[in-house]
Image: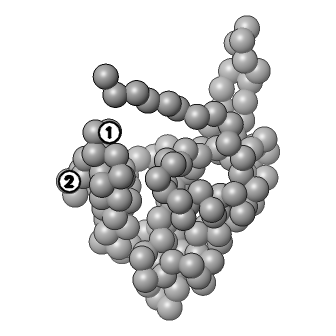
Amino acid sequence: MIIRPAIQDDEEALVELLGAVYSFHARGLPALYREPGRDFVLELLRRDNLRHMVAEVGGTVAGLVQYSLECTEATPLKPARRFIAVATVQVAPPRRRQGIGRALMEHVHAWAREQNASHVELNVYEFNEPALRLYEELGYTTVSRMLKREV
């Protein structure tokens, strides 16, 4: 397995991976998410503020992680922070449970140390049990919970 920056030739594989992420969330939380079109996915891939790293296995893109370095200024309420925000982690369904998600996240952790970030943050929904298991195995802990009540 090779973890490397995404390149233009990866575009179709990345559109497929991201499409699967958005479909999963649209099915899990249809009141909150819908499936975006291809143009939206391509626009995400072109954002300069996100790093896009892929896991390549046997010459094929098997997974993706998108993340960014975030720096916030101190306020009277909060200290300044320098951290990595993970936007998306996705592994192709036939490649799951092979350590690809773990390898992508370990890459993020190493990059965070290189950037002198204090921590890595991510958001995961309660219905995404496989992701929750992975993150817990990697040492992530719950910091907050968003609650919702239909009226």
Seen in the picture, residue 43 relative to 10 is either above or below; the reply is above
Between marks 1 and 2 in the image, the one whose residue lies nearer the viewer? 1
Q: Residue at x 72, y 18 (%)?
A: 78
Specify few, some or many for label 2: CA neighbours under 10 Å numbering under 14, 14-19, or 20 or more: few
Residue type marked 1:
Leu
Q: Can the viewer see residue 50?
A: no
Label 1 vs label 2: CA separation?
Answer: 16 Å
100 on left or right of 64: right
Residue drawn 41% across the image and 47% down it = 47
Q: Nearer the viewer, residue 13 or 148?
A: 148
Q: Which residue is mark 2?
A: 37
Give residue 99's quadrant in the image: bottom right
- Label 2 element class: loop
* Amino acid tagged 2: Gly
Name the spot of residue 82 as percent of width and height, x first.
72, 35
Task: Please name the residue shown 54% across and 64% down the image.
Answer: 130
Q: Is residue 142 found left or right of 100 in the rendered image?
A: right
Rendered residue at 52%/32% (across/down): 146
Residue 110, image x, y percentages: 74, 60
Horizontal arrangement in the rendering, residue 109 relative to residue 145 (left or right): right
